[in-house]
Image (tube, grey):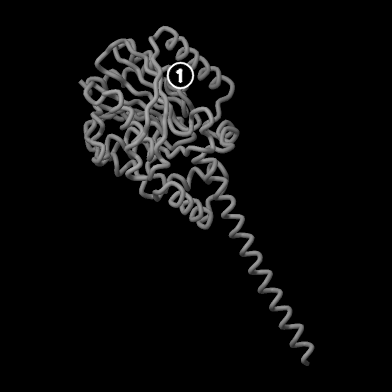
Amino acid sequence: MNRERHEKRNFWLLLVLAVLAGVGFLIWGQYNTASTIFDMGFFRRNAAELMTSAEGVKLEGEDRERYDRLLETGDEWTEKAGLKQGSWRTESITAWFGEPAGITLSYDLYTQGADRTVILLHGFQEGVKDVRYWGAYWWDRGWDVLIPQLRSYGAGDEGVIPCTYGVYEQFDLYDLILSLGLENETLVIQGRGTGAAAAVFLAANPDLAGAGLDGIVAESLYANMGKDAKTMVKKLFGLGNPLLLRFLNAQIRQKLGFLPESVDLTAAAANSTVPALLVWGEDDGFLDPQLTVQVGDAWKGEHRSVGLTGGHRLLWAVSGEPYREALDGFLELVG
């Protein structure tokens, strides 16, 4: 009898240990997976291969050819325009996120001595070349064109400086504008994705007083980092269980200093009186077009919202003329 009890006790002890070990491995696995997603999403470690293969964002065949032609037109324009290069120190951010958040970034300024400037900002996994083709539109209408380096997109920045989808970047833009004295000129920002989000946050931030912005053009926005991250994690990684998302949110809060749910573009739009043009691709398979619509519907100030034919990053290639017409109308709002 004692032997049977002993064997039964050992059985239950081993079962409990096995369950605890399984739960431990599950938690550890979810934590490691969340860490990998955090590194890829914010520090962009090993993100290039993922983004070039992700459904809805990868460019193949005719789409790749269209986009390459766009890049060529941007290169051709920059060869004709007068280029000045410089750098600036981001300092205002340190009051919110501490000294390590202050960094030095560079910019390209194409100037024709105008008293009006447009700042062009790219999206996630893009670079300055991916928005140069917008420059010719503004240049031909008498604007100077400023294309700054965004966080995590300079030489050696990957894996060192985080991309924060507009949260830190809004302060970078504020310091850039003040360092060049652009707050006293006519000033517009045109951006896509991360760059567009930075413009929206800057326009709505009462502590930065909009930095003298006269208008923004925002293409392909997310609406709320916390909510939309769940969708993107599931879309890109096929994951999205509550435990993993809790670990991911905890790392964002601990390492970057903000809660994803608090990064709300819709709430920012409801506080912004800066004139805006919101543009989305009706065929965007990467960012849900309804997210941009949602931000536009919440916009407090005068604005126009336009849906165009084309997928993610291809609006200018597919619907260039309607896009330019929308910009012409937007300039009437700016004055």
Identify the residue at horizontal 36%, vertical 34% (top origin).
90
Answer yes or no: is residue 3 visible. Answer: yes
Kindly identify which residue carries mark 1.
317
Give percent across and percent down for residue 166: 38, 37
Q: Toward the viewer: 73 or 157?
A: 157
Give percent across and percent down for residue 135: 38, 16
| Quadrant where the image shows the C terminus | top left
Q: As drawn, is 117 to the left or to the right of 52?
A: left
Give percent across and percent down for residue 188: 29, 24
Q: As drawn, is 132 to the left or to the right of 208?
A: right
Crowding at label 1, few (<14), some or many (≥20) Cα neighbours within 10 Å? Answer: many
| Quadrant where the image shows the N terminus | bottom right
Identify the residue at horizontal 57%, vertical 32% (top origin).
48
- Helix, strand or loop status at disc 1: helix
Identify the residue at horizontal 69%, vertical 78% (top origin).
12
- Within the image, what quadrant is residue 270 found in? top left
Amino acid type shown at disc 1: Ala
Identify the residue at horizontal 48%, vertical 25% (top origin).
127
Q: Toward the viewer: 147 or 273?
A: 147
Q: Residue furthest bottom?
A: 1
Give percent across and percent down for residue 198: 36, 35
Q: Is residue 285 above or below residue 96?
A: above
- Within the image, what quadrant is residue 15 found in? bottom right
Answer yes or no: is residue 290 visible. Answer: no
